[in-house]
Image (tube, rainbow, N blue to C red):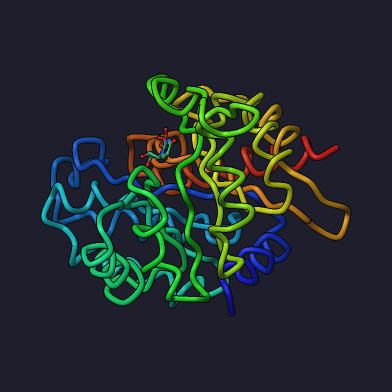
Amino acid sequence: MTFLQQLHAAERLNQSMLCVGLDPEPAKFPGAWKGDAGRIFDFCSAIVDATKDLVSAFKPQIAYFAAHRAEDQLERLMAHIKRVAPQVPVILDAKRGDIGSTAEQYAREAFVRYQADAVTLSPFMGFDTIEPFLRYADKGVIVLCRTSNPGGSDWQNQRLADIPGQPRLYEHLAHLAQTEWNKTGQLGLVVGATFPEEIARVREIAPTLPLLIPGVGAQGGDAVATVRAGWRGTAEGSTAPIIVNSSRAVLYASSGEDFAAAARRVALATREQLNAARG
Ligand SMILES: O=c1ccn([C@@H]2O[C@H](COP(=O)(O)O)[C@@H](O)[C@H]2O)c(=O)[nH]1
């Protein structure tokens, strides 16, 4: 199955466009686990178990594991998700980007070591840094386009004077991803929920690509505006999927022993809010 087939299947099965982000911070763990990096797997797997029927994807962010020398726990978590939620694709948020020979190693890390279904990449160094990932033809490759952070405007909103029509950098990236870069048909784009007008613009330029949209919840992005700007589909399902990520708002909904139940409540409410916005 390709990443896009997995995504469509999970969307349908779980009636969801919500992605739960797995960004474990031991300092925020509940009770006796607080501060214990040895509990990263236990914490994340409890969140997965509590939300696996509510999501279209999970998105572990690799830095939260590497910072605590917990790559082994990320490997166990990936295997756990495959076991308990084989229907849910996993996007490894790694934002890699380097020359081809190094990119080959990053691709191996994402798809062989961690068995991810998709990975996020930075396109700053150009297509030859993306291409090694496309050799894994079924895997999703999700390229940063218009990121959710305020500083994203520093580069991504600049106009490219040498290109006809002088598109903004993020518009040009969306065009490349929809056309010549999309050799496998499995490319997607990251666009922040904090910029719904830009989501709409990206959707115009890239009418079929999956959009990974972080920024609802803790970053304050507008969930309803996000869906209206990015989702396209019918009662049968999406023709242009969006994967709306929420991490901290779900993970740390409660700092008590009920953290997994509280995460489920927030995930459920967010899923319903997103679905209602489809109109
Ligand atoms: O533009 C981007 C790209 C990636 N992210 C990542 O998404 C989550 C957001 O976490 P929240 O707690 O829901 O704010 C995090 O892993 C970021 O690294 C992003 O926020 N914006």
Residue name at image x 79 percent, y 46 percent: 232
Quadrant location of the N terminus in the rendered image: bottom right
Q: Is residue 233 left or right of residue 174?
A: right
Residue 18 pos. (x, y %): 59, 48
Residue 241 pos. (x, y %): 68, 52
Q: Quadrant of ligand 1?
A: top left
Q: Is residue 5 left or right of residue 237?
A: left
Residue 141 pos. (x, y %): 47, 60
Residue name at image x 52 percent, y 47 percent: 264
How many discs appear?
A: 0
Q: Quadrant of residue 103?
A: bottom left
Q: In front: 150, or 123?
A: 123
Residue 34 pos. (x, y %): 18, 41
Give above or below for 120 relative to 156: below
Q: In front: 190, or 87?
A: 190
Give above or below for 110 relative to 62: below
Q: In front: 30, or 198?
A: 198
Quadrant location of the C terminus in the rendered image: top right
Q: Quadrant of residue 124?
A: top left
Q: Is residue 221 left or right of residue 240?
A: left
